[in-house]
Amino acid sequence: MGTTQRLTSRIPMIGDKTDRKDVVAVVKLHGVINPQPTPLARGVINLAAVETALTRAFDHDRLKAVALQINSPGGAPTQSGLIAERIRQLADKKNVPVLAFAEDLAASGGYWLACAADEIFAHRTSLVGSIGVISGGFGFTGLLDRFGVERRLYTAGKNKSRLDPFSPEKPEDVEWLGKLHNQLHEMFVDWVRERRGDRLTSEEELFTGDVWLGAKAQRLGLVDALGSLRDVLAERYPDAEIVFAEPKKPLLARLGIGAPAAALLDAVESRVAWSRFGL
């Protein structure tokens, strides 16, 4: 080999990937799970909001694993299911492991998302669980009577106005809602059992809707181990590059413009969801 050949052989060619590191992609799932977008899409998790982040995370050529950084009090069950199913679709297609990391809270729908992972980790102070279903509202019949307001409601179909907040509550409507809750709860339990399998304990308290700190959640089999994202990934994949897959921001977010009234309502709803867990 001549001098020129020896020198040029040391120059990396365009497209040469020999020096590229393996990748662990991290997707942040932070906020309340809500099908409705916000003006700035902050603090809300739904499939539309996280689709681009998930796609980017699983699209790396040298992907070794995907990590889900979860901090959520839960929310809409359908969106929880859709996101979890999408994660499994992408993971099975790429044949890579998925690791979930609970931060402050992985509760209710937040834990549903965590179960999409092959392994779940939590900090010792994390709150994990809340495997149950909840809904709430207000009744305004007394308020209307106080101000002399008459409620007029016209429907076709005898059950069209179930649980109308401006009408007296009916026992049969409450019973109907309870049946829906029970059905959703059974689906939630089935999903947890499917994903966690024999790692779960047989304790009766497991599916009561309660939450536990990280160590107790580990004993119950809801999480596999205690640990933070950085520590676990550094131990498992010491030579891999950690990259964060961000979702594509909506136009208003890129412009820094939001609707103050809508943002205020979103903040109130979010505050209520987090406050149920003392956060």
Image (spheres, rainbow, N blue to C red):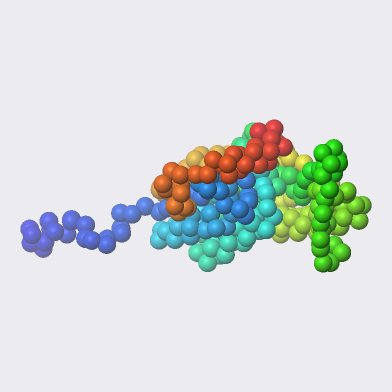
Q: Quadrant of the C terminus?
A: top right
Q: Nearer the viewer, residue 208 or 216?
A: 208
Q: Nearer the viewer, residue 208 or 181?
A: 181
Residue 65 seen in the current view: no
Residue 86, given in percent of the width and then of the height, sits at 58, 61
Q: Nearer the viewer, residue 251 or 158?
A: 158
Q: Is residue 95 left or right of residue 9?
A: right
Report the residue at 41% width, 46% height from top.
255
Q: Nearer the viewer, residue 10 or 55?
A: 55
Residue 41 seen in the current view: yes
Residue 194, given in percent of the width and then of the height, sits at 71, 59
Q: Residue furthest right?
A: 171
Residue 225, given in percent of the width and then of the height, sits at 63, 43
Report the residue at 66% width, 42% height from top.
269
Report the residue at 21% width, 60% height from top.
13
From this view, report whether residue 243 is shown above or below residue 146. below
Q: Is residue 6 left or right of residue 150?
A: left
Residue 105, given in percent of the width and then of the height, sits at 64, 40
Report the residue at 47% width, 52% height from top.
250
Q: Is residue 190 left or right of residue 249?
A: right
Q: Quadrant of the N terminus?
A: bottom left
From this view, report whether residue 131 is shown above or below residue 228. below
